[in-house]
Amino acid sequence: MWLPEVAGPVELDDGEHRRLMRFLGAQSQREVIRARNRSLRSMKAQAELGRYLGGRPPYGYMLVDAGPHPNRADARWGRRAWKLAPDPRTAPHVKWMFARRVEGMSVAGIARALNERGVPCPSAVDPGRNRHRAGECWGAPTVKTILENPRYTGRQVWNRMANDRDDVDLRTGRPGQYPNLPEDWAISLDVVHTPLVGMRDFTDAQKVRARRPNGDGGERRYLLAGLVVCGVCDRRMDSHWVHGRPGYRCRHGHTSARPCPPDGPTLLYWREDRLLEHIALVAVPDRPVCADTGGAIVASWVEGTRVICGRDGVEIRDDRDECGPWAPVGGWRRRTTA
């Protein structure tokens, strides 16, 4: 390899040349980081101004011509700007989803109703951009993603998701993604494309997830909501009210919109009072087992504590431990048996 800095070819046996190569590599890496930061700042500013930054349009929208490119140099080359406009094929379905959600229908219920009506899912509508998806039917996560997308209010949004280059899907070659915090989003102040839902209805749809009163005016309370993890598939277990008492279940990724196949794992279910008794047995094995004791122990937990439920027992772990994810909490290393 020839470099002008050494006025000739690089000799790796020469110590000066090796030090120069390390210096040039550090300088190149520094410039890459600076260029990335400049690009991110520019994209954030353009999103706040309402400019469409590319990517696939959300379900319910399509791309239309927005006139000459705002950059004069690009406009002279004949490049055009683009913006989002309602897709007459799919926009009515998005409005229907928000209307049903505001009425109180569950996410799984909306997905099941869409499948029963034969509404094509996003990957079926646009198979060219979704070659890695089967496009067979709607799922609860797809409906949830649509209902939580603020772009349906007519505003441009950027930086909702971040790429994880260390977690690459070997099947598709795409990097993994994780959601950013709302304070890191860039949202345009003005409405820049036709909204499919009003801001009030969008806000009401987000509040539906909150606990609602029962028919008799009471409320269903779950002491372990968000803390119980399935030991079979590592998914967070759903809160489930049955026979007048709280419990937790895991359907291993299947929902009423996408039922489990006959040869799949059976549903895992734990009553809350039994879980609290097991928690008390793990934490204070020398005291009488009592659900109230388990409830007091749960109230004293810090963020990061989880209850791992298997078919044959329960274990308490902490994902903040330096030993790695799901390390046992303190001295609570016993595992109960059902």
Image (cartoon, rainbow, N blue to C red):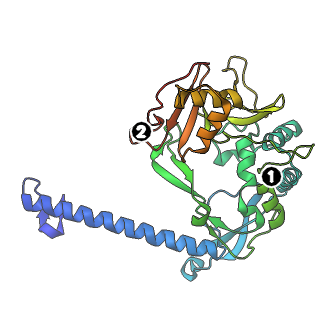
Question: Considering the numbered disc 2 on the image, is that residue within a helix, a strand or a loop?
Answer: loop
Of the numbered discs 1 and 2, the one sitting upstream in the chain is 1
Numbered label tally: 2
For mark 1, does the 10 Å Cα neighbourhood hold few (<14), some (14 to 19), or many (20 or more) residues?
A: some
**In what quadrant of the picture does the C terminus appear?**
top right
Q: In this figure, which residue is indicated by the disc labeled 1? A: 208
Query: At 11% across and 54% down in the image, what residue appears?
Result: 12
| Circle 1/circle 2 CB separation < 8 Å | no
Query: At 63% across and 34% down in the image, what residue appears?
Result: 293
Q: Quadrant of residue 23?
A: bottom left
Q: Position of residue 53 (x, y in %)?
A: 61, 67
3 vs 322: above or below: below
Q: In this figure, which residue is indicated by the disc labeled 2? A: 324
Query: At 34% across and 68% down in the image, what residue appears?
Result: 31
Query: At 44% across and 69% down in the image, what residue appears?
Result: 37
Amino acid at dot 1: Val
Whether residue 231 is visible, yes or no, is no
Side of 283 where 136 appears, left or right: right
267 vs 330: above or below: above
